[in-house]
Amino acid sequence: MSDGTFDDAFVGDLDRLLRWRRDVRRFRREPLEPHVLPEILEAAELAPSVGNSQPWRWVEVRSGAGRQAVRDSFTRCNTDALRGYAGERARLYSSLKLAGLDDAPVQLAAFCEPDPGQGHGLGRQTAPETLEYSVVTAVSTLWLAARARGVGVGWVSILEPAEVTAALDVPSTWKLVAYLCIGYPARETDTPELERAGWQFRTSAEERLFVR
Ligand SMILES: Cc1cc2nc3c(=O)[nH]c(=O)nc-3n(C[C@H](O)[C@H](O)[C@H](O)COP(=O)(O)O)c2cc1C
């Protein structure tokens, strides 16, 4: 609604969006409709940020060299991660698909600018990490805006941030917060991939609420 109030139908739709959001690793290879990326980046600008600093810096990774460097970093890190598991967990880990780097038409790195003039330092003097939290809120907003448009997002953290930062030729002071694969999902599901694979199920909210 245009006045900033939302009816029950919208709330129901929003809950459905949250339930069906998904971290996507299996993409159709077709390119995104050209309007999608600008729209979801614009939506991300509506995210909250400490001091209204908007410290997120996006890098759309189009170059073959950039993508290959990220792919190589993922392969190395994933191999190392596998070594940390044994037995049945190791077998399960090696069966997981943990990135859509080969198929996603769009790859987007989200960095944090650690010294944005914008915001004048408000809110982060005792908690400078709130700048990075702000980037996460932008990623989360982009994720939902994408899903609402039928577009999937997958967050790849199995990377060496220094390698990605160097490969993308950004200021070395920028901190990598997220590396995102974006495209049309190969399938829709309301169940996380890690649940379907038997790796980790969601647990209930009451386990995480503490009252003092
Ligand atoms: C900070 C962060 C890092 C993540 N890194 C990875 C990753 O490297 N590879 C992957 O397959 N999924 C990654 N995920 C996705 C989670 O596995 C996923 O969100 C979780 O299993 C719940 O599934 P859902 O997002 O589909 O609800 C990441 C998610 C977050 C929030």
Image (spheres, helix red, strand yellow):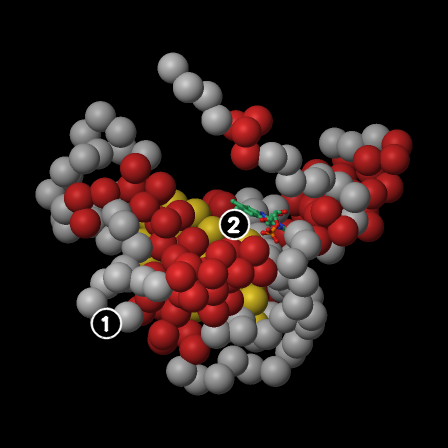
Q: Is residue 11 left or right of residue 113?
A: right
> Of 112 and 2, which appears nearest the observer?
2
Structural distance between the alpha carbons of marks 1 and 2: 45 Å
Give percent across and percent down for residue 46: 27, 60
Disc 1, disc 2: CB below 8 Å? no
Residue 177 x/y as whole percent:
43, 47
Q: Is residue 93 above or below residue 22?
A: above
Q: Estimate how packed mark 2 is, as few (under 14), some (14 to 19) or many (20 or more) residues with alpha carbons within 10 Å.
A: few
Tell me which corner region of the image, top left, top right, bottom left or bottom right, holds residue 64.
bottom right
Query: Disc count in the image?
Result: 2
What residue would you read off at disc 1?
Answer: 2
Location of residue 161 in the rendering, given as x and y in whole percent from the top left corner: 49, 46
Q: Earlier in the sequence, mark 1 or mark 2?
A: 1
* Disc sitting over residue 163 in the figure: 2
Q: Residue furthest front?
A: 8
Out of 53 and 167, give the one closest to the viewer: 53
Q: Is residue 189 left or right of residue 95?
A: left
- Identity, as a three-letter code, of the amino acid under mark 2: Glu
In the picture, the disc for residue 28 is none
**Can residue 128 be seen from the camera position used here?**
yes
Residue 10, relative to residue 123: is it above or below?
A: below
Secondary structure found at label 1: loop
Under 8 Å from ligand 1: the CB of mark 2?
no
Residue 13 or 188: which is nearer the viewer?
Answer: 13
Q: Residue at x 64, y 40 (%)?
A: 202
**Labels 1, 2: front one:** 1
- Give the side of residue 161 with respect to residue 30, left or right: left
